[in-house]
Amino acid sequence: MNSNGTDILIIGAGISGLLCATELQRQGYSVCLLDKGRGVGGRMTTRRMQGARLDHGAQFFTARDSRFQAYIDEWMDAGIVREWFRHLPGESEGPGHPRYCGVGGMNAVPKFLARNLDVHCTERVNCLVRNIDHWVAQTESGDSFRADQLIVTTPLPQSLLLLETAGLDWANGDLKRLREIRYEKGLAALVILDGPSNLPEPGGMKLSDSHLSWIADNRMKGISPDVTALTLHATGAFAEEHWNSPDSVRGPRMIGAAELWLGSRVVDYTCHRWGFTLPRNPWPRRYFHKECLNLVLAGDAFGGPRVEGAALSGIETASAIGQLV
Ligand SMILES: Cc1cc2nc3c(=O)[nH]c(=O)nc-3n(C[C@H](O)[C@H](O)[C@H](O)COP(=O)(O)OP(=O)(O)OC[C@H]3O[C@@H](n4cnc5c(N)ncnc54)[C@H](O)[C@@H]3O)c2cc1C
């Protein structure tokens, strides 16, 4: 057993798990987070490639809720986050609303949150055991983590598979509806150019193409000062169609669809598959709580997709657990 046990174990150190842990720790709980990735952040990820830095998952986030806005204000004061833009090309004029990004990349936010938390990366949980009054999570590396309360924040289809290993009837009549929540697949092409692109300010653009839904210039965004590097996101339909195509097929097609905006020669590219982008039909509440088992499911499948939805799911899960005491 790797740990003598904590009050709360959170599986998944994406934005929902990290904010949930932050709030619970503020309430005085001992919290441990496990993530299968080499670093924290999940879909808020930034990658280095040939001297460039690219955001290849979430591109920016919004804040409509004052609780999330309070975190953003704190991150802006700390120099972690900045406003990227209020309007994209083609959007109507007017005051617009701020779209934020991490300074140096989207991963800056999860990294900042993790600095005061007990996070164990490269720990893929592959089995859950429910004992009389506690949970044990077993990981691929052979470690075990014990806690009174379990919070699972992985994309919902992964959470459901993981919970099957516990062999419990934990969701009763709700399992069917939880299984109906579907995520769209995604495909990103990361493209290095030998000079400036043709993208207009602010360096990001929604597309209504059959192949691409989004294009961003990470240099214009301010996260890749030395090298021009584009992030191209495929439409859900293109990602489905080319899920198993080699990069040598899907890469050139995505780059071809962005030709108008390239402006310079392509030096290199790679593609990345996203099994889960956004939930199409999220659960109507911010979390799923099974009090008698000390179990909560949270994340962007609950109460609203995107970074802000996931963040609010984490925040509201923590406040629900706090109210139990
Ligand atoms: C291509 C793409 C573009 C996007 N664009 C935007 C955007 O512009 N704006 C926006 O607001 N949102 C965007 N989103 C959505 C946004 O990124 C997510 O809604 C949000 O980051 C989800 O956070 P989360 O904490 O719920 O889940 P995640 O970030 O997925 O975190 C879950 C974590 O669980 C870990 N995990 C999974 N299984 C296990 C296991 N068995 N054991 C241990 N750990 C495990 C994963 O490694 C991951 O770190 C985008 C997503 C994608 C993929």
Image (cartoon, rainbow, N blue to C red):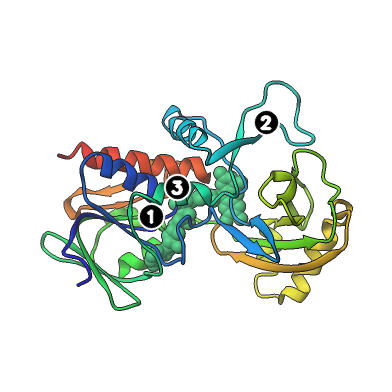
Point out the tag, 1 or 3, that comes first from the N-terminus.
3
Query: Is 20 in front, or is 250?
Result: 20
Disc on res. 153? 1
Q: Visible in this render: residue 13?
A: yes
Asked if the residue under mark 3 is in contact with the one under mark 1, i.e. CB atoms within 8 Å, the reply is no
Q: Position of residue 123 (x, y in %)?
A: 37, 69
Q: CA distance from mark 2 to mark 1?
A: 30 Å
Q: CA distance from mark 3 to mark 2?
A: 24 Å
Disc on res. 86? 2
Residue type indicated by callout 1: Thr
Q: Label 2: state its secondary structure.
A: loop
Asked if the residue under mark 2 is in contact with the one under mark 3, i.e. CB atoms within 8 Å, the reply is no
Hey, which residue is sitting farthest top in the picture? 94
Query: Is 98 in front, or is 302?
Result: 98
Residue type indicated by callout 2: Arg
Q: Residue at x 72, y 21 (%)?
A: 94
